[in-house]
Amino acid sequence: MLSEAGFIFAVILIIDTGEGIAEKYHSSLFTNFSRLGQQNSRTEGSGVGLVITKRIIEEMGGKIGFESKQNIGSTFWFE
């Protein structure tokens, strides 16, 4: 795509059909150490991956976001 300023940019979508993310967790998704209710599960992770990703993308002038419905799946995007 070509922006108004004449730069070429891309929009990347990552789509899954997994559990989705409960709406009550949407506002804290990009918060440090947020495990979204998975603290006692076998799912590994420290809860900083999306925080780091967001910082990198925004430092480069990009945007990141998501849509998710529980029991349907999630779509993450960045540009």
Image (tube, rainbow, N blue to C red):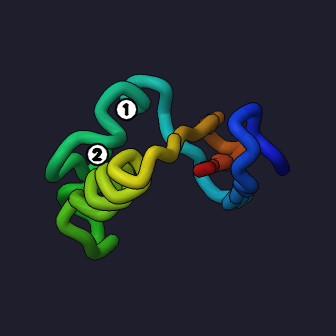
Say which element carries label 1.
helix
Q: Locate residue 55, reporting x and y percent.
A: 30, 51
Kind of residue at disc 1: Tyr
Tags 2 and 1 in contact by the CB under 8 Å rule? yes
Say which element carries label 2.
loop
Q: Locate residue 53, reporting x and y percent.
A: 37, 59
Kind of residue at disc 2: Gly
Q: Which residue is mark 1?
A: 25
Q: Residue furthest front?
A: 6
Q: Quadrant of residue 68?
A: top right
Q: Residue at x 63, y 35 (%)?
A: 67
Q: Residue at x 36, y 26 (%)?
A: 27
Indicate left or right for 30 with 65 as reference: left
Q: Residue at x 42, y 30 (%)?
A: 26
Rendered view: 5 above or below 47 = above
For the residues marked 2 and 1, what is the alpha-carbon distance in whole angstroms?
A: 8 Å
Which circle marks residue 10 in the picture? none
Indicate left or right for 31 with 71 as reference: left
Q: Quadrant of residue 12?
A: bottom right
* Of labels 2 and 1, the one closer to you: 1
Rendered view: 68 above or below 14 = above
Q: Which residue is mark 2?
A: 37
Rendered view: 34 above or below 49 = above
